[in-house]
Image: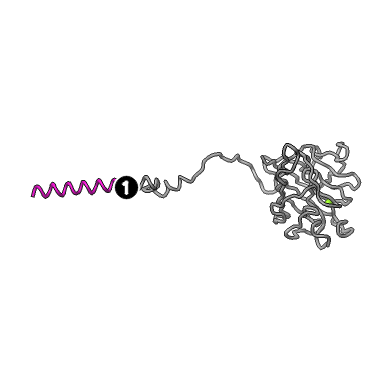
Amino acid sequence: MRNLSRYLCLLALVVASSCTTATEAEQANNPEAGLEPWQQAEKSEVWEPVPPVVAAELGQAPSDAIVLFNGTDLNAWESASDGGEAGWLVEDDGALTVVPGAGGIRTRHEFCDVQLHLEWRSPAEIKGEGQGRGNSGVFLQERYEIQVLDSYENETYPNGQAASVYKQSIPLVNAARAPGVWQSYDIIFMAPRFDSAGALETPGTVTVLHNGILVQNHVEIQGTTEWIGPPQVHEHGCAPLYLQDHGDKVSFRNIWVREIN
Ligand code: MG
């Protein structure tokens, strides 16, 4: 009887030992075996880097934005023709309006990759048609135009309507509001990259939301905006944002930019 007990004891030890060996082998092959679900979940958590906090109140520029126009002054802007005072009108209602003939204006600061927000309004009184109605433009790096145009029930060539990359990319939809109504553009622009010899290395890209609606989705920029002929590619560095005087009293407000690093 005593021998039987010893035998059973030894058998139990052997079984236990082999069980332990199997569990160790299993854990070696699968380190997560035996972990609680929350312990397994922790393994895919990334805790650094912690994003900086940005205040983003509705209708206001984010706290880390460069405010280019907030309704009061044109300190951030200059005449694009001679670098003098920007000759556009700051109106009582906080709008910045094109003075036809004054020429385009550009930021004093130069930008590379940006997130840009601005609001614009074509004149309430309808004058002209096609490209002659509420025409202005937002030129990224002074070269690449996102068209501003009264495209509300106003036929023109689609690659020149509001929110087109002018003469390069037709917007996905026409999200234009009526003349005299404020509209918004939110633009994400990645500037083109050039190699040390000045050749294009990576084309620029642009994404545009018109009144919150996606109209240009990571579109590759072919080169400079040209009225006549194909786009041109020339090496350049960071450059100002430029707003176009096309002879129409288009207004702007709430212009801010965030530099993408
Ligand atoms: Mg234009």
73 w.r.t. 173: above or below: above
On screen, residue 142 above or below 208: above
Q: Residue furthest right?
A: 101
Residue 234, image x and y in percent? 79, 42
Disc tally is 1
Q: Is residue 222 magenta?
A: no
Can residue 250 be seen at all in this image of the molecule?
no
User: Is residue 23 located in the magenta-colored stretch of the structure?
Assistant: yes
Residue 251 horizontal/vertical position (percent): 82, 49
Provide residue 241's location: percent of width, then percent of height: 78, 43
Q: Residues within 10 Å of mark 1 (few under 14, many from 20)?
A: some
Nearer the observer, 228 or 243: 228
Q: Secondary structure at mark 1?
A: helix
**Colouring rule applied to residues:** one colour
Please indicate, yes or no, whether residue 61 appears anywhere in the rendered image: yes
Is 15 on the left-hand or right-hand side of 249?
left
The amino acid pointed to by label 1 is: Thr
What quarter of the picture does the C terminus occupy? top right
Q: Which residue is mark 1?
A: 23
Stretch of the chain drawn in magenta: 1-24
- Is residue 187 found left or right of 87 in the rendered image? left
In the image, the residue with mark 1 has its CB under 8 Å from the nearest atom of ligand 1: no
> For this rendering, which residue is in front, 87 or 39?
39
Give me the residue at 34% from left, 46% from top: 25
Looking at the image, which residue is at 41% across and 50% down?
37
- Write the residue at 75% across / 45% down: 255
